[in-house]
Amino acid sequence: MKKYTTIEDIENLTELINKAIQLKNNAFQFEALGKHKTLVMLFFNASLRTRLSTEKAAKNLGMNVTVLNVNDAWNLEYEDGSVMNLNTAEHVKEAAKVISQYADIIAIRAFPTLKDKTKDESEFIINSFIKYATAPIVSMESATAHPLQALADAITIEELKTSPKPKVVLSWAPHTKTLPQAVPNSFVSMMQKLDVDFVITHPEGYALNPEITKDVPVYHNQEEALKDADFVYSKNWSSYSNYGKILEVDSSWMMTKEKLASAKFMHCLPVRRNLVVEDAVLDSDQSLVIEQANNRTFAAQIVLKNLLENL
Ligand code: AN0
Ligand code: CP
């Protein structure tokens, strides 16, 4: 692996998942690998899990870690050839090269604007760093993808499935804030690579990018989609076709204990209780959200290990 900004960067998924699960029993097995190596984490946006689990993963591998909240640094310019007489103080060309001198691996969190689809889909922040940095780049959630979350989710499903080909349902949930499609995009791509029976359910107007969903069955009837589910992944996302818009906050799409039946419940967190999912689900032993968050460490650790081995 030379970078990890999409799950397409994974060479052998089954092997990576199995190795991540093995790491859980012996987290410090490779602590010599990262000696005198530094992970620099750049945050353009807030984080709880990604920040703490990625730092923990790096430290388990013996790495040093530096965190920069980019809002505390200079406002970066990304346009080539621009006259920088406005609000940007430093070009990404210099910044990426300078950071590369302090870092062996650079991890970046950069959310979309959710206003300009073309700009978001260009992934100008993460792609500028891929272009100008000399250290490998890890996405900690970009405009269109959250590959570390998807890997943690795959690990969770592999560990906890009770049948060879479980049924997994991605179910849109209500929210009052405009949220990205990054988490569902990477989850959908990941489910297409696993041996699962996968369906998506969302209200009309919330179709994800068809280049990502491809031929995955989509139901506008949530009840029908949830039939015989083994894993239910709830997540809100804003409209993709009516880009970045909240079309409705229909509380009937909230996940309930009754709808969940005997399935396991998944969510990437942070989750708004009694808006996305009711308390009775999160407070039950059917909820896997804490296990998913724990697996973020081992997803990050197996990715960092792979990158360190290829430096
Ligand atoms: C973000 C999102 O939906 O992409 C981060 C989730 C990991 N969620 C919020 O901003 C609430
Ligand atoms: N799931 C996830 O990425 O959480 P944070 O936004 O808290 O990092």
Image: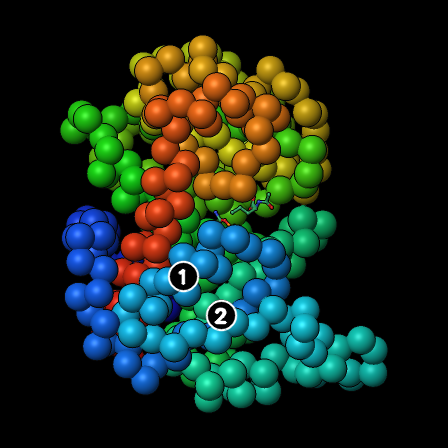
Q: Amino acid at mark 1?
A: Thr
How far across and down, in percent of the image, does residue 103 sit?
Answer: 43, 81
The image shows residue 297, relative to residue 268, as above or below, that is: below
How far across and down, in percent of the image, does residue 286 sit?
Answer: 35, 24
Query: Position of 153 compared to 238: left or right?
Result: left
Residue 170 location, quadrant: top left
How far across and down, in percent of the image, does residue 202 sit?
Answer: 53, 25
Tell me the crowding category of disc 1: few under 14, some 14 to 19, or many 20 or more residues within 10 angstroms, Cα based. many
Label 1 near label 2: C-beta < 8 Å?
yes
Residue 138 location, quadrant: bottom left
Q: Which numbered marker is on residue 46?
A: none
Ligand 1: quadrant of the figure:
top right
Tell me the crowding category of disc 2: few under 14, some 14 to 19, or many 20 or more residues within 10 angstroms, Cα based. many
| Residue labelled with disc 2 | 41
Query: Position of 209 compared to 294: left or right?
Result: right
Q: Which numbered marker is on residue 54?
A: 1
Q: CA distance from mark 2 to mark 1?
A: 9 Å
